[in-house]
Image: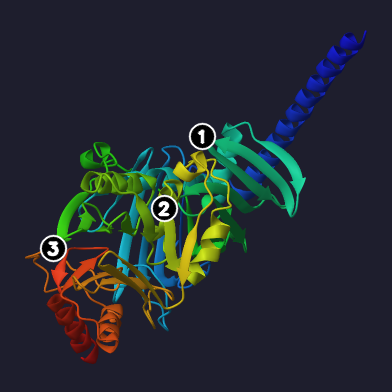
Amino acid sequence: MGRKLSLSFALYFGLLLGLCFSASAQDAKSVLQSASKAMGDVKSIQYSGSGHVGALGQAFTPGGAWPINDIKSYTRTIDYGSKSAKEEMTLVEPTPIRNGGGGPFAGEQKQVNLVSGQSAWNQPGNAAQPAVAAAEERQLQIWLTPHGFLKAAMENNATAKKGKGGTVVSFSEGKFKLDGTIDSQGMVTRTETWLPNPVLGDMPVETDYSGYKDFNGVKFPTTIVQKQGGSPVLNLTVTDVRANPDLALTVPDNVKAARIPPVNVTNQKLADGVWFLAGGTHNSVLVEFPNYAVMVESPLNDARAAGVLAEARKLIPEKPIKYLINTHDHFDHAGGVRYFVAEGATLITQEMNKGFYEQAWKAPRTLDPDHLAQSPKKATFVTFKDKYVLSDGGRELDIYRLPGDIHNVVMSMVYLPKEKILIEADDFTPPPPNAPSAGPRSHAGTVLLYQDLQQMKLDVATIAPLHGFVVPFSELQKAASTEVSSASK
């Protein structure tokens, strides 16, 4: 008798749950239909304006807000049917200039970012540059727009429930879960989702829409604020909206054929037991000690970290990587740190970074589980305030915090006094040998680095940069003097 009752209850509960889901889906459909009518059903849309853009993962202070550049002009055109979008913006250096990361530039910087289906590319000038890794997010961003959200929700069996500020509609688009709030006027006021990030894990992406206005029969927000990882990446004031513009994108052949290239790690011996590991956009340096090895920097992500570690094991197969030195917390330089933690390395970093990493690493990593998520291990840290020295078996390695750095408040550099090698990140990026450019790329941070080295009285013969190519110290001197001369004109 008890089994029959249990079975009956299970069937009843399942039926009730199914009815509730059906009712929720039906509610969502009516809410979406009403919202589409209120906002105006469009096949494509174009909106323009100006505002600010934040550089994700480039905070001046660990855990701080992303640094801001000003958007002089912005236009985004979306065709929902072909799943295509074209984003055009002109950035200008903010006034006053704010501290923080990102690539420094002078004057204006124009960007054209495109996506069509699963293909993404950038269009600087007339050349199409494949942006394979950006395709997934750019496609997702189409469905985070107000009208895009309504269309995607209608096609993906959305459900609805009452929430703060109105009705919360939820659905999944591929591996991504999307939530959107629709107010009593039928306006989409907020969309939420999550993106995988090597540092932040399942990173929240929250977009708020406000100040709706009628643009020739189409309702559209005049203020758009998107936050990623809790800090704004876009703050846009919309001044013009066009309904149903033409956007016929043809994916270039080189973009169709593009694939994410395999990780390439090369090695260049700088001195006995010191190797420069390059082959990509970011570099690392391997330093051998009598019974162990030290890796300086693990950038980008797990894939790069795995390649760097594999190369290190080829060079020094019998010695473990005991320490990983991290110069600063910017995501492109910290994205592979967790991989080395999973491999048992102790992380040496400036003391302000420790709390940020510990907090960030608590986040779930369901969208793209990394090596540490798959092989959980408690991170061990060695932290320092201004200087830390590793000395063993005649080898000395000095780590200095750079005072007054304008790229990151706790930026650190590594110096090998016996070999006279300086390892630095971001402040000086030497171009390839015999490059057609006028000289090494430099900026205000290059001058400050040179001045710091003079004040610290470090005897440097070789620069091993974590971007760019190994050069003699004279190249830093030249770049710093060029920047000073340009600034004085």
Q: Residue furthest bottom?
A: 488
Q: Is residue 56 left or right of residue 477?
A: right
Mark 1 Cα shell of 10 Å, populated few (<14), some (14-19), many (≥20): few
Callouts 3 and 2 close, C-beta under 8 Å: no
Residue 31 in the image: above or below residue 401: above
| Residue 441: image location, x then y, percent | 20, 72
Residue 32 horizontal/vertical position (percent) = 66, 40
Q: Secondary structure at mark 3?
A: loop
Q: Earlier in the sequence, mark 1 or mark 2?
A: 1
Answer with the quarter of the image where residue 355 lies: bottom right
Label 3, label 1: how many angstroms apart (C-alpha)? 41 Å
**Three-letter amino acid code at the position of disc 2:** Ala
Q: Amino acid at mark 1?
A: Gly
Which sits in the foreground, 345 or 256?
A: 345
Residue 19, by quadrant, is top right
Observer-nearest residue: 312 or 116?
312
Q: Quadrant of the C terminus?
A: bottom left
Report the disc number at residue 432. 3
The kind of secondary structure element at disc 2 is loop
Mark 3 or 1, nearer chain start: 1
Dot 3 amino acid type: Pro
Residue 206, picture quadrant = bottom right
Residue highlighted by disc 2: 345
* Residue 326 image offset from top left, x and y in percent: 39, 63
Q: Residues within 10 Å of mark 3 (few under 14, many from 20)?
A: some
Mark in front: 3 vs 2: 2
SS type, badge 1: loop
Please, is residue 118 above or below residue 337 in the view? above
State the residue position of label 1.
174
Quadrant that contains the N terminus? top right
* Residue 86 in view (yes/no): yes
